Image: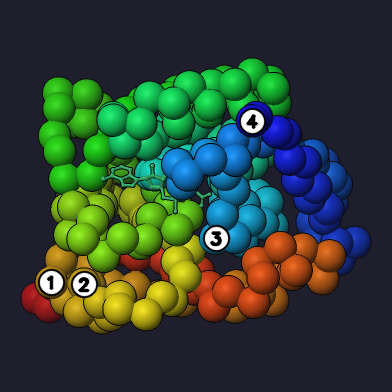
């Protein structure tokens, strides 16, 4: 069964006077087993980060990995980013659902299949300097972590100023982020407390999940 969830964003009075003060985004969700068809708590946190940092996203090239229902990418498009939404090539129903959501919100995003760790001719068109790569809860299955970071490294390599901003939930049995960063030649910085960024009205939506919000870049080589 398809439902539509409504997500409200408000700007606090102390923030910049530019841009709109509020935003409403509608997301198509399908309540079934497929985990790319409903909104995960990490997505709520990342979307709020995009909203609150809209100046960084306005006019930027944004690529969302494992976008699923694509809430952060849609918010980025709404604040003026040029957005490519991707999910696994073998999840056509997820890509189809994204199209419905883009239409519903009247945003024009490119929607493309991108399976981590696999390279097609089209993958090379996704690399850009100064690109903001987003990923909400893409560190989900530990067996996919190396494929994910192979793709992230491919997208960041030689692309000056590109970054990967991701939210992930600490789950038991996960390999540590430090291990993955060292293995893939990346560095990770915590951006902000994930819960603090959420307005009080949204905190119950993340249901006490322990969520990290980090920025990942290529590790700088010592000269
Ligand atoms: C836990 S869901 C998160 C979905 C969405 N980002 C959110 O937070 O609501 C993980 C997402 O990663 C996608 N995914 C899983 N394995 C993938 C792979 N190997 N390549 C590309 N996408 C993948 C899934 O289809 C799903 O949309």
Is 52 placed above or below 206 here?
Answer: above
Quarter assignment of residue 79: top right
* Residue pictured at 58% horizontal, 74% vertical: 209
Sooner in the amino-acid sequence: mark 4 or mark 2 = 4
Q: Which residue is mark 3?
A: 42
Of mark 2 and mark 3, the one earlier in the sequence is: 3
Residue 105 point in image, percent of width and height: 70, 26
Q: Report the Cα–Cα distance between label 1 and label 3.
A: 24 Å
Residue wearing tag 1: 183
Q: Position of residue 24 (x, y in %)?
A: 79, 39
Mark 1 or 3: the one toward you: 3
Alpha carbon separation for disc pair 2 and 3? 20 Å
Is residue 52 left or right of 182 when viewed as pictured?
right
- Residue nearest the observer in this picture, 27 or 111: 27
Q: For the residue labelled by badge 3, is the local secondary structure a helix, a strand or a loop? A: helix
Specify which label sits upstream in the sequence, 4 or 1.
4
| Circle 4 or circle 1, nearest the eye | 4
Q: Residues within 10 Å of mark 1 (few under 14, many from 20)?
A: few
Q: Would you say the residues marked 2 and 1 are in contact, meaning their CB atoms lie under 8 Å apart?
A: yes
Q: Determine which residue is flagged by label 4.
A: 1
Q: Quadrant of the C terminus?
A: bottom left
């Amino acid at each position: 069964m398809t439902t539509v969830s409504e997500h409200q964003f408000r700007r606090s009075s102390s923030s910049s006077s530019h841009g709109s003060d509020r935003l409403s985004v509608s997301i198509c969700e399908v309540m079934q087993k497929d985990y790319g068809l409903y909104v995960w708590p990490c997505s709520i946190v990342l979307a709020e980060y995009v909203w609150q940092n809209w100046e960084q996203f306005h006019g930027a090239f944004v690529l969302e990995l494992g976008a699923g229902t694509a809430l952060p990418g849609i918010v980025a498009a709404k604040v003026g980013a040029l957005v490519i939404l991707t999910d696994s090539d073998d999840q056509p129903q997820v890509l189809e659902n994204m199209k419905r959501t883009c239409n519903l919100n009247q945003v024009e995003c490119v929607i493309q299949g991108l399976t981590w760790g696999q390279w097609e001719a089209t993958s090379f068109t996704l690399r850009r300097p100064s690109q903001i790569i987003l990923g909400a809860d893409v560190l989900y299955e530990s067996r996919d972590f190396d494929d994910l970071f192979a793709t992230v490294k491919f997208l960041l390599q030689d692309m000056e100023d590109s970054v990967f901003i991701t939210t992930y939930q600490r789950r038991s049995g996960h390999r540590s982020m430090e291990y993955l960063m060292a293995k893939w030649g990346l560095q990770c910085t915590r951006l902000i407390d994930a819960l603090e960024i959420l307005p009080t009205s949204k905190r119950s939506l993340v249901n006490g999940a322990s969520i990290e919000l980090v920025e990942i870049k290529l590790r700088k080589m010592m000269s």
